[in-house]
Image (spheres, rainbow, N blue to C red):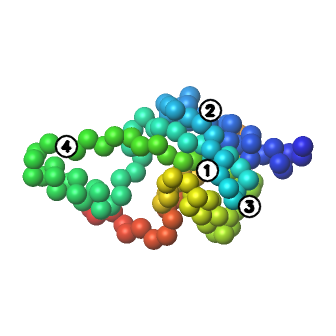
Amino acid sequence: MSSRIQQPENAALAVMKNLQDQHDWTDLEFIYLKGPTRALVKGLPSKRLYLHPDDQIAALAQEQATGERVPQEAVHEFVLPVHLSEKWSLADFAAVFDSFTNTDTREKRIVLATLHNDSTVVYYIMQEGMVKPRQN
């Protein structure tokens, strides 16, 4: 196998280990979807990563009305591991989102995990389409 073929697999393994050891994620597994020929990582973070602006507004309104904070439980997230040297286009990312259409769920966001040569992993939340900004 060439290093080009192994690179996505190595990135997926490194990201999974980073999520488990450094960020306390649990219930980790590799997910293989039709379309992109690479593994995604599915797991449960130790706390909720993202709250949609509409849900955030509703939670704030409920908190003001009741005086109690609304619990935000963590949900399973899908992580796309990539190596910094890989070249990705918008069409490539769209193909990843499209690959969820044949599954039980239609994901609107994924976590992009970019692995650097020094084993540093940087995480970004990627949304499909336009998302209105958060209210301050």
Give the CA distance from mark 1 to mark 3.
Answer: 14 Å
Rounded to the nearest angstrom, the CA distance separating label 1 from label 2 is 14 Å
Q: Can residue 117 be seen?
A: no
Please, what secondary structure does the residue beneath circle 4 have?
A: loop
Whether tag 1 and tag 3 are in contact, CB under 8 A, the answer is no
Q: Is residue 44 above or below residue 124?
A: above
- Going 55% across and 42% down the picture, which residue do you hit? 42
Side of 10 where 96 appears, left or right: left
Q: Is residue 28 left or right of residue 37?
A: left
Q: Nearer the viewer, residue 130 or 96?
A: 96
Q: Position of residue 32 (x, y in %)?
A: 66, 47
User: 122 or 56, which is in the foreground?
Assistant: 56
| Residue at the image position 41 percent from the left and 43 percent from the top | 75
Q: Earlier in the sequence, mark 3 or mark 4?
A: 4
Label annotation for residue 69: 4
Between the C-alphas of marks 3 and 4, the distance is 43 Å
Q: Would you name the residue on which mark 2 appears?
A: 17
Q: Earlier in the sequence, mark 2 or mark 4?
A: 2
- Amino acid type, residue under disc 3 in the picture: Lys
Q: Earlier in the sequence, mark 1 or mark 3?
A: 1
Label 4 is placed on what type of residue? Arg
Residue 68 lies in quadrant: top left
> Mark 3 sits on what residue?
87
Q: Are marks 3 and 4 in contact (CB under 8 Å)?
A: no
- Relative vertical location of residue 58 with respect to residue 42 in this rendering, above or below: below
The residue where tag 1 is placed is 80
